[in-house]
Image (cartoon, rainbow, N blue to C red):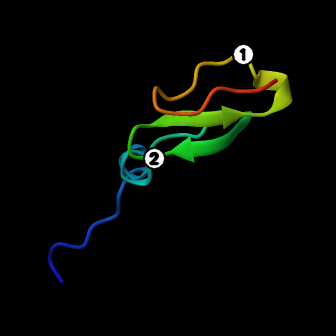
Amino acid sequence: MKNMRKLNKSDLRVIKGGIIPIGCNSWDPKVRCCRSWDAEHAGNPTCADSPPSFA
């Protein structure tokens, strides 16, 4: 197969949806944002359509 080539790590991150930040419990690869954070990182921003946190 001629179209097979080794992909760079940066290309793979884009395909997989980006690097998941530390403390993210629920990552949305399509929008590339975190839906919910753990208790230690609860103040970080979430996706626009995610439910509000109750912490």
Please name the residue that numbered disc 2 is placed on. 29
The amino acid type found where label 2 is placed reads Pro
- Farthest residue in the left direction? 2
Q: From the image, which quarter does the N terminus lie in?
A: bottom left
- Farthest residue in the top direction? 43
Determine whether, in the image, residue 31 is placed left or right of residue 51: left
Residue drawn at (41%, 43%), measured in percent from left and top? Answer: 10
Please name the residue that numbered disc 1 is placed on. 43
Q: From the image, which quarter does the C terminus lie in?
A: top right
Query: Could you say which quadrant of the image residue 42 lies in?
Result: top right
Residue 47 is situated, as x and y percent measured from the top left of the image, at: 50, 29
The amino acid type found where label 1 is placed reads Gly
Residue drawn at (72%, 15%), measured in percent from left and top? Answer: 43
Q: Secondary structure at mark 1?
A: loop
Residue drawn at (59%, 33%), measured in percent from left and top? Answer: 51
Residue 2 is situated, as x and y percent measured from the top left of the image, at: 14, 77
Determine whether, in the image, residue 34 is placed left or right of residue 17: right
